[in-house]
Image (spheres, grey):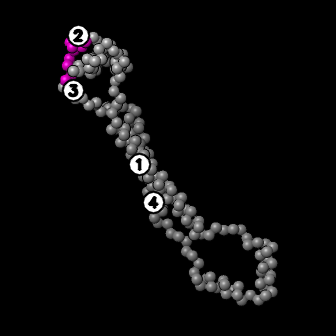
């Protein structure tokens, strides 16, 4: 059977069991409460109407901070994912050269005579092809992959924020410990 033992400092009634007789209990206010002997316990107010499940935790500053931080992370994650998702969805690949443009370049090379081709080759040999430019299509694919990674990070932040906010409301408080 359970009984209610009042805390001497704050007056809160702590629920105790007869098996705890002679031990110490720490109240939420921080006071150490001596649990009386078995005979004295039976003189206390009975707590038989109390449910056996623990009470859900009351709202406190720590839970409020975790809840607010979770919401902030969720909102930032949502904004990041929405922005990156929009950019990712609306991205357009650069256009490839038209077959007519390629054909015109090849025709220009085909029309070179031997001395012109030799001079062009010597210039390329001595000066090189010039700086390397990555193909636009390759640059586009890299940019799309980076935007997609940002999108995924935003979704993970959204999930983490929602989880933190929900857990701050749902998790029970720590029960009082008997010594």
The disc placed on residue 85 is: 4
Question: Nearest the camera: 77 or 173?
Answer: 173
Residue 129 lies in what quarter of the image? bottom right
Give the residue number, with chain letter if any, for mark 1.
159
* Residue drawn 66% across the image and 84% down it: 106
Give the residue number, with chain letter if any, for mark 2.
39
Q: Secondary structure at mark 2?
A: helix
Q: Is residue 30 visible?
A: yes
Q: Secondary structure at mark 3?
A: loop
Indicate whether residue 3 is drawn in magenta.
no
Q: What x and y, as percent, mark residue 114?
A: 79, 87
Mark 1–mark 3 Cα distance, whole angstroms, equals 37 Å
Q: Is residue 77 visible?
A: no
Question: Nearest the camera: 50 or 23?
Answer: 23
Instruction: Of the two numbered discs 1 and 2 on the same chain, state the one appearing first in sequence.
Output: 2
Indicate whether residue 45 is drawn in magenta.
yes
Mark 4–mark 1 Cα distance, whole angstroms, equals 16 Å
Q: Are marks 3 and 2 in contact (CB under 8 Å)?
A: no
* Residue drawn 49% across the image and 59% down it: 148
Instruction: Of the two numbered discs 4 and 3 on the same chain, state the one appearing first in sequence.
Output: 3
* Residue drawn 50% across the image and 55% down it: 150
Q: Secondary structure at mark 4?
A: helix
Instruction: Of the two numbered discs 4 and 1 on the same chain, state the one appearing first in sequence.
Output: 4
Which span is picked out in magenta? 38-48
Q: Residues within 10 Å of mark 3 (few under 14, many from 20)?
A: few
């Amino acid at each position: 059977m359970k009984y209610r033992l009042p805390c001497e400092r704050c007056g809160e009634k702590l629920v105790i069991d007869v098996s705890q007789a002679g031990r110490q209990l720490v109240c939420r206010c921080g006071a150490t409460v001596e649990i009386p002997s078995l005979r004295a316990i039976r003189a206390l107010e009975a707590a038989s109407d109390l449910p056996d499940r623990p009470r859900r935790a009351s709202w406190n500053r720590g839970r409020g901070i975790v809840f607010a931080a979770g919401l902030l992370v969720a909102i930032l994650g949502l904004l990041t994912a929405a922005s990156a998702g929009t950019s990712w969805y609306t991205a357009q690949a650069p256009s490839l050269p038209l077959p007519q443009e390629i054909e015109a370049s090849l025709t220009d090379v085909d029309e070179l005579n031997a001395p012109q081709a030799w001079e062009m080759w010597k210039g390329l040999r001595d000066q090189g092809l010039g700086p390397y430019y990555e193909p636009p299509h390759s640059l586009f694919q890299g940019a799309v992959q980076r935007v997609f990674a940002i999108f995924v990070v935003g979704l993970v932040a959204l999930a983490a924020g929602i989880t933190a906010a929900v857990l701050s409301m749902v998790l029970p408080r720590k029960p009082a410990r008997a010594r």
